[in-house]
Image (cartoon, rainbow, N blue to C red):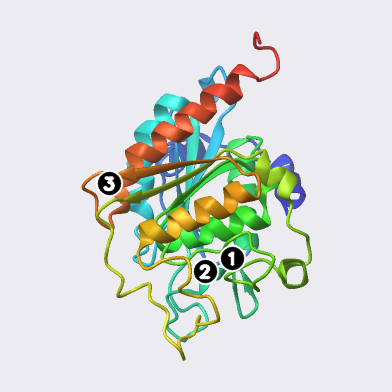
């Protein structure tokens, strides 16, 4: 997909003044909302620093995935200042509820819904944005909260080699690195489901962060009941509350040899925007390390 987009960009005529002005208004800074070229049922918005083309270091990509409430523009806005001062572009996808016409709010959380592969949709958006801004986004940072936390937990297991950082925020349900249980609770049938083995070496090399509010105690939305669409054996075994389930996920990752930074945020209930500063501190730390190691920089 990225090769096709690159070829199209190379063949395009030089932009007119009007095209340049429109790009400055609608592409740079807080963008308008774009339909995915791969599948227009899905959309995204971005934040690209106005100094994009004058930056003295390569831009990095940060992808932020909304939860069930689909507050994707709010997350984009919350990461804008971070992106401006850290030479990053922010991409926030929109996975609307019910793309199959059934009103399902939760399909994206499990990466696959009928014939939709949400992980592939996101990767195609990353390619599209890389071509648009002329950047190398072969790796990117990924953060998601609540339902988005479920998505990034599972995306990180499936595509760790595509990430330079992973931050998992307050998922209601977690997928453990557990070879004794099937997907989605564990990864026993991972390769059969996704056509690729779990890349544990890439996961061990990935900076992983987990974050949840200490006061995130409500369980009405996260308790799986027999007969529910995602109920399976072990569905509630990771814990009763989100902090308990995230701690179980941390233990699962660390047992597999993956280093994890876990932040429990004081006085915060289930509120993703209240956790953004903590996530940005983690990403800024990873960025500093990455850029110190960049070619041409003193070691």
| Sequence order check, earlier mark of 1 and 3 | 1
Q: Distance between the residues labelled 2 and 3?
A: 23 Å
Above or below residue 253? Residue 191 is below
Task: Write down the residue under mark 3.
Answer: 274
Asked if residue 67 can be seen in this view, the reply is: yes
Please name which of the two marks, 2 or 3, marks the residue nearer to the observer. Answer: 3
| Sequence order check, earlier mark of 1 and 2 | 2
Closer-to-camera residue (26/222):
222
Q: Is residue 124 left or right of residue 74?
A: right
Residue 118's disc number? 1
Asked if residue 122 can be seen in this view, the reply is: no
Judged from the image, the secondary structure of the residue bearing numbered disc 2 is helix
| Sequence order check, earlier mark of 2 and 3 | 2
Label 3 environment density (alpha carbons within 10 Å; few <14, some 14–19, many ≥20)? some
Q: Are marks 2 and 3 in contact (CB under 8 Å)?
A: no
Judged from the image, the secondary structure of the residue bearing numbered disc 1 is helix
Residue beneath the point at 53% across and 30% down:
286
Residue beneath the point at 34% across and 43% down:
276
């Amino acid at each position: 997909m990225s090769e096709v987009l690159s070829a199209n960009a190379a063949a395009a005529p030089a932009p007119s003044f009007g095209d340049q002005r429109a790009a400055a208004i609608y592409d740079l800074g807080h963008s308008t909302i774009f339909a995915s070229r791969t599948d227009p049922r899905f959309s995204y918005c971005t934040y690209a620093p106005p100094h994009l083309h004058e930056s003295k270091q390569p831009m990095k990509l940060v992808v932020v995935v909304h939860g069930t409430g689909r507050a994707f523009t709010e997350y984009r806005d919350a990461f804008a200042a971070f992106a401006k001062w850290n030479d990053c572009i922010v991409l926030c996808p929109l996975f609307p509820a019910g793309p199959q016409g059934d009103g399902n709010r939760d399909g994206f959380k499990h990466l696959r819904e009928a014939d939709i592969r949400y992980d592939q949709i996101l990767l195609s958006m990353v390619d599209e944005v890389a071509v648009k801004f002329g950047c190398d986004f072969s790796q990117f940072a990924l953060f998601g909260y609540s339902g988005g936390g479920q998505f990034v937990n599972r995306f990180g297991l499936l595509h760790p080699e595509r990430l330079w950082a992973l931050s998992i925020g307050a998922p209601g349900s977690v997928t453990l690195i557990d070879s004794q249980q099937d997907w989605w609770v564990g990864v026993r049938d991972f390769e059969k489901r996704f056509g690729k083995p779990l890349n544990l070496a890439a996961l061990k090399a990935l900076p992983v962060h987990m974050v949840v509010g200490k006061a995130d105690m409500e369980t009405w939305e996260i308790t799986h009941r027999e007969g529910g669409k995602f109920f399976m054996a072990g569905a509630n075994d990771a814990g009763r509350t989100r902090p308990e389930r995230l701690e179980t996920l941390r233990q699962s990752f660390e047992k597999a040899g993956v280093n994890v930074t876990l932040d429990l945020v004081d006085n915060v209930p289930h509120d993703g925007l209240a956790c953004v500063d903590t996530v940005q501190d983690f990403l800024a730390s990873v960025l500093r390390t990455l850029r110190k190691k960049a070619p041409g920089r003193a070691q």
